[in-house]
Image (cartoon, grey):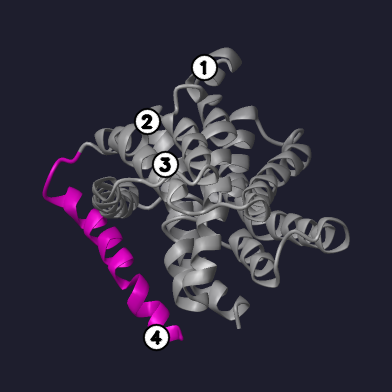
Amino acid sequence: MTLDLLLKTAPIWTLVLVGAVLPRSFAIDRKSISLLLIYFLIPVVSFVGVAKVRVVPSDIGLVGFSFMLCLGTALLLRWPFGGFVDTRTRNLVITISSVPNAGFFGLPIVMVLFGEEAFMKMVLIATGVGIFSNSIGFYLVARQVMSVRSAASRVLRVPSIYAVALGILFSMNAITLHPAVLEFQQLCKATYTVLAMLLIGLAVPRPFPSMRTHLKVVGGTVFGKYLVMPAVALVLIALDHTTFNVLTHTSRTLVLLTAFMPPGLNTLTFALLLDIETDIIAALVTGGAIASFVLIPFLAL
């Protein structure tokens, strides 16, 4: 299983490595790539990905649980850091910690470990995470350089929110997409995968930032991502088991695994879009991916 996981994710790490090496020889505009991802590729992939899955009410629970996983983590992290760090650092820690990479990290991992049926459930979990990331997550990043009103208005201009909502509407009404649309989405998905992984590599800082100078951000992220979020996941799973009983055993396992996935790439993408310093974000995204790659297979045993 470990070998299968290694072979499945090898192309991802190859793209990250290529992205890290390319800037040594070529000048590449990272912000242009971010704009292409946010305003075109992510909406297309999100809409078709949700629309082609036949969502039933119990599956909607997965979207809600993953959204609450992110929201609960973000709310809990506001308390311990409120009096110790400035607002900019607090929002950065909360955003990095509360948005797991459930999409282009989580989906291939789940496919290898659990198979096709679990993969479709993971798509719904990634949808919930995406809704949080493209709304509250984007707002928290934007608040580092904008007023509350300006940040809120920028959230309303993120097209992925409307793409996911439209996809759910298509799915619940059993509207079938034309095969040409599905083929176009596959092309966009492949392009997104390549550009997203390259962007991680492109954003790897040179030289690598000293973690000692970013102790508050690093310490806060480790605490939030690998302690607070798993704790929130366990509470939600227990609540479902005793009260709602919406999630299956596999779904509960996937929610818990999602809590241990690395920080999401969207945080880095949003930071590039808003011209925010990205060195420490890129370092945490890359480091988190390596840590999760080692940790998750053991959790799934």
Residue drawn at the location 53% of the way across and 48% of the way down: 127
3 magenta-colored: yes
Main secondary structure type of the part rendered in magenta? helix
Judge from the rendering whether residue 74 lies leftward or rightward of residue 119; answer left or right: right
93 over 275 or under it: above or below: below
Give the extent of the magenta segment: 1-28
Q: Residue at 57% of width from left, 54% of height from top?
A: 125
Residue shown at the point (39%, 47%) measured from the top left? 176
Q: CA distance from mark 3 to mark 4?
A: 33 Å
Q: Alpha-carbon distance for marks 1 and 4?
A: 46 Å
Q: What residue did someone put label 1 on?
A: 153
Describe the element under mark 3 as helix, strand or loop. Answer: helix
Q: Nearer the viewer, mark 3 or mark 4?
A: 3
What label does residue 3 carry, if any?
A: 4
Q: CA distance from mark 3 to mark 1?
A: 22 Å
Query: Which residue position holds label 2?
Result: 273
Res 14 quadrant in image: bottom left
Looking at the rendered structure, the kind of residue marked 2 is: Leu
Separation of disc 2 and disc 4 at Cα?
37 Å
Residue 249 screen position, x and y as percent: 70, 71
Disc 4 marks a residue whose amino acid type is Leu
Furthest-right residue in this view: 242
* Cα separation between marks 1 and 2: 15 Å
Say whether residue 279 is visible: no
Residue drawn at x 52%, y 32% is 138
Bin the neighbour count of mark 4 within 10 Å (Cα to Cα): few under 14, some 14-19, many 20 and up: few
Look at label 3 and name its amino acid: Phe
Left or right: where does residue 251 sit relative to residue 152?
A: right
